[in-house]
Image (tube, grey):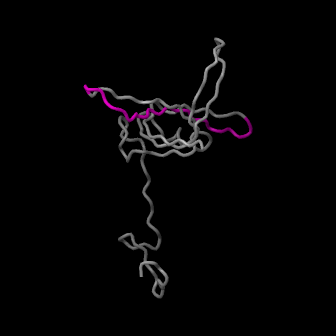
Amino acid sequence: MNRVILMGRLTRDPEVRYSQGERAMAIARYTLAVDRRSRRSQDGNEQTADFINCVAFDKAGEFAEKYFRQGMRVLISGRIQTGSYTNKDGVKVYTTDIVVEDQEFADSKGGAPGEGGGYQPTSRPAPSSAIGDGFMNIPDGVEDEGLPFN
């Protein structure tokens, strides 16, 4: 099984490009700084992190482009993908990326440093059958037989 779950902060705004062809697809690349769980040095100044390259395609790429900003803490899941290429100097370069399948905000509103959070959740409308206290009205005559808490 190839499954990765990471939480970290964006080191910069996502870099987004669009594929060519009949249907252009967003391809967003970003790097997460993921803190390591390790012993701190005696002076307490050792802060270690891994910098993980991530790539999100299509709708996930568009979402990253629209909402993700440097410094935000995000939670992603996906899979590891390795590859290689030969650079202009003729040297073979090996790559490791996380192909993002799910991504979400890990901070509450206003939680990211710098820009006041960036993520502004929308308020959820109340159900049409709700009364002022947020509970739904149950019509008369509805039986609750067979429920496990009777």
Placement of 99 over or under 88, stated as above or below: below
Image quadrant in which the N terminus is located: top right
Residue furthest toward the left? Answer: 43
Q: Position of residue 98 (x, y in %)?
A: 56, 36
What range of the chain is rendered magenta? Answer: 21-43
Q: Nearer the viewer, residue 78 or 142?
A: 78
Residue 39 shown in magenta: yes
Residue 33 screen position, x and y as percent: 44, 32
Across and down, in percent, residue 138 comes to 44, 80
Res. 3 image quadrant: top right
Question: In the image, what residue occupies the spot 36% across and 34% down?
Answer: 114
Which residue occupies 53% across, 41% down? Answer: 4
Count of marks, rendered view: 0
Q: Nearer the viewer, residue 11 or 79?
A: 79
Quarter of the image that includes the C terminus? bottom left
Whole-percent x and y of residue 36?
40, 33
Position of 41 with respect to 135 (left or right) is left
Whether residue 135 can be seen here: yes
> In front: 100, or 124?
100
Determine whether, in the image, residue 102 is placed left or right of residue 125. right
Picture quarter containing residue 22? top right
